[in-house]
Image (cartoon, rainbow, N blue to C red):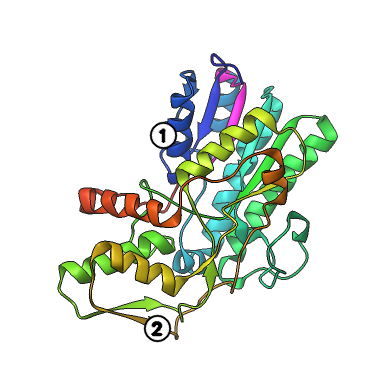
Amino acid sequence: MKKNDKIFVAGHRGLVGSAVVQKLKNEGYDNLILKTRNELDLINQAAVAAFFQNERPDYVILAAAHVGGILANLTYQANFLYDNLMIQSNVIWNAHQYGVKKLLFLGSSCIYPRDCPQPIREEYLLGGKLESTNEGYAIAKIAGMKLCEKIYEQYSKQFISCMPTNVYGTNDNFHPEHSHVIPGLIQKIHAAMIENKPEVKLWGNGMVKREFLYADDLADAIYFIMQYYEDKLFLNVGTGEEITIKEVAHLIAELLGYKGALIFDKTHPDGTPRKLLDLTRLHALGWKHKISLKEGLGKVIDYYITYGANARFSITEW
């Protein structure tokens, strides 16, 4: 990418999209196309076609999505499937139709089978049943990735994908019911501390393991992939490190200074037991994460304490 190329970052106000925009600006890119949902509804096929016909971006980073945590994924399966299918199809196909040179689609590690061998290699895709609590979202993400792959094969265009692990950061969604695990834990534990509650109840048994990637590290990986990677094979993006939810919760409580008990409610679902990504492909290219979990959690907690009620409570990333 050249500094004067037109780059459309879809979902620029979301957790990942906002980090990507900041990374591009830091690298000297100022010809960015950024549209709010009110300015461009990516679910509207005609509107997206008109946008690409008029703007003709050179590059596209597709970070826009309808996202949420385990409760939102379970409750709104149809919405997550439909909205994401429409967003992806409209952006990817019109990018193809109107001459985009390279497109990077962001998937999710939930695309892999629930009971995958660990760590999860890219070739394990479609090798078994998905986790039922986020099946709708996962199917949409698989479809987006496959559309990019088939355009690459049929039209020889660099439409590629990467599959990030669980992402967290300062511009995250802290909705008490629809957030992902880290912002959800921060919100609940912080509320219990402010209200002087002796304990806080958390979902699941706390023993499932997750891998967490700070949004700025993901933005750095996206920039790296856009600059240096041209293969059709999608890439896992993560840290290669995993931790139990219970350990994360206790680390958050420690950083917040909460002294109460953390009670795990085993009547609620846990989701996939493990999702540790194999990063052999990406590491071989020369990229590795820089921000540790403790450092990243500290940044997010500082952000949440500073902004409190003004923190983002949206379950959309576009």
> Is 289 one of the magenta-colored residues?
no
Establish if 77 lies above or below 232: below
Mark drawn on residue 36: 1
In the rendered image, the quadrant that contains the N terminus is top right
Q: What element carries label 2?
A: strand
Q: Is residue 94 at all visible to an observer of this figure?
A: no
Residue furthest bottom in the image: 267
**Residue picked out by circle 2:** 265
- Percent coordinates x, y for residue 245 in the rendering: 45, 71
Q: In which quarter of the image is residue 100?
A: top right
Pointer 2: residues within 10 angstroms few (<14), some, or many (20+)? some
How far across and how far down the image is residue 161, in percent?
67, 42
> How many residues crowd around disc 1 within 10 Å: few (fewer than 14), some, or many (20 or more)?
some
Q: Where is residue 165 in the image (x, y as percent from the top left)?
A: 57, 55
Which of disc 1 and disc 2 is earlier in sequence? 1
**What stretch of residues is rendered in magenta?**
54-63
Residue 310: image location, x then y, percent:
23, 48
Residue at position x 18%, y 77% in the image = 197
